[in-house]
């Protein structure tokens, strides 16, 4: 049955853009339409370019969970077509992740309830992740005889280490929010009833920060996974030089010397 509401909602509150996964009746399970809509929402934010109105992007899920993995009913409708269905979903999802990786603003995942399969991969791909205390994480793929997608095999071992990533991927056990915090999968755990409020507070704090500096930080840290020391030193020099010419840098220096709180404009 065709969804009668958009599977993904894109909105902006001040300098904070929100991408909300919106298939709540199936715990936001990912199908072709939702994957394509998520890609398009990410592209819309990216097309603003540097200096655009968005200074932080939040990804959240409507309903009782964040994202409960792929919509397995789609794979069962016509088993012979499953490889093509999977490919269509993955192509859109992976394009979205490539777009997110290149953004010049922080990406914050706000998760609750089931965070499974592609949902866990997406949570790991964000720069920061805040979780409700009812969040339940699982890689899930091995449970259906599949392998991870959505950058899960790239980001998970970098967050928790190779040996633990192997355990999480192969056994696909369910991990609670507190254990996810201990492992480094999330940055903060809050009461479920406070998730929206806490997410907004963190997003607004990021949106009021030095946006160009944040862009440099996220790109430097992300590239450090594969760069040599020489490459990283050169990149650090170039980024610091670029930020030293910004209005926010001048404001930061002036505020520091005046012993006051800086007011950053994101430029």
Image (cartoon, rainbow, N blue to C red):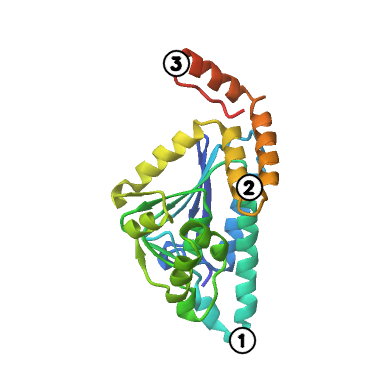
Residue tagged 3 = 259
Q: Which type of secondary structure does the marked residue at label 1 adopt?
A: helix
Quarter of the image where one finds residue 152: bottom right
Report x, y in % for residue 230: 70, 45
Q: Earlier in the sequence, mark 2 or mark 3?
A: 2
Q: For this rendering, which residue is in front, 53 or 219?
A: 219
Q: Residues within 10 Å of mark 3 (few under 14, many from 20)?
A: few
Q: Position of residue 231 (x, y in %)?
A: 70, 45
| Disc 1 crowd, CA 10 A, few/some/many (<14, 14-19, 20+) | few
Of 81 and 100, the residue lying toward us: 100
State the quadrant of the C terminus.
top right
Indicate the quadrant where residue 216 lies.
top right
**Label for residue 44?**
2
- Percent across and percent down for residue 107 are 53, 46
Distance of label 2 from label 1 (alpha carbons): 34 Å
Q: CA distance from mark 2 to mark 3?
A: 39 Å
Q: Which residue is mark 1?
A: 80
Furthest residue in direction top, as rendered: 258
User: Would you place residue 217 above or below residue 134 in this image?
Assistant: above
The nearer-to-camera label among 1 and 3 is 3
Q: Residue at x 46, y 75 (%)?
A: 170
Residue drawn at point x = 40 percent, y = 44 percent:
199
Task: Give SS at disc 3.
Answer: loop
**Marks 2 and 1, the one that precedes in the sequence:** 2
User: Which numbered disc covers residue 176?
Assistant: none
Instruction: Classify residue 185 by image quadrant.
Output: bottom left
Upstream in sequence: badge 1 or badge 3: 1
Per the image, label 2 sits on a secondary structure element best described as: helix
Above-or-below relation of 259 to 10:
above
Asked whether, in this view, residue 205 is left or right of residue 75, the answer is: left
- Asked whether residue 14 appears in the rendered view, the answer is no
- Residue 134 can be seen, yes or no: yes
């Amino acid at each position: 049955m065709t969804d009668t509401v958009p599977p993904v909602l894109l909105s902006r509150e001040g300098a904070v853009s929100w991408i909300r996964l919106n298939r709540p009746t199936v715990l936001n399970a990912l199908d072709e339409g939702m994957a394509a809509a998520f890609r398009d929402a990410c592209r819309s934010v990216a097309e603003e370019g540097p200096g655009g109105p968005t200074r932080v992007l939040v990804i959240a899920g409507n309903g009782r969970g964040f994202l409960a993995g792929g919509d397995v009913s789609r794979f069962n409708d016509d088993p012979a077509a499953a490889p093509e269905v999977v490919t269509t979903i993955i192509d859109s999802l992976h394009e979205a992740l490539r777009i997110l990786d290149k953004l010049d603003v922080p990406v914050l995942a706000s998760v609750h309830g089931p965070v499974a399969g592609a949902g866990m991969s997406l949570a790991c791909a964000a720069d920061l992740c805040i979780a409700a205390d009812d969040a339940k994480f699982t890689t899930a793929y091995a449970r259906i005889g599949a392998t991870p997608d959505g950058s899960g095999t790239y980001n998970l071992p970098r967050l928790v280490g190779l040996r633990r990533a192997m355990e999480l991927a192969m056994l696909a056990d369910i991990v609670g929010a507190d254990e996810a915090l201990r492992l480094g999968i999330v940055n903060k755990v809050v009461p479920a009833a406070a998730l929206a409020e806490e997410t907004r507070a963190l997003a607004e704090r990021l949106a009021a920060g030095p946006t160009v500096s944040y862009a440099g930080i996220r790109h430097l840290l992300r590239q450090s996974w594969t760069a040599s020391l020489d490459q990283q030193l050169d990149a650090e020099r170039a980024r610091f030089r670029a930020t030293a010419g910004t209005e926010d840098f001048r404001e930061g220096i002036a505020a520091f010397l005046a012993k006051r709180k800086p007011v950053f404009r994101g430029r």
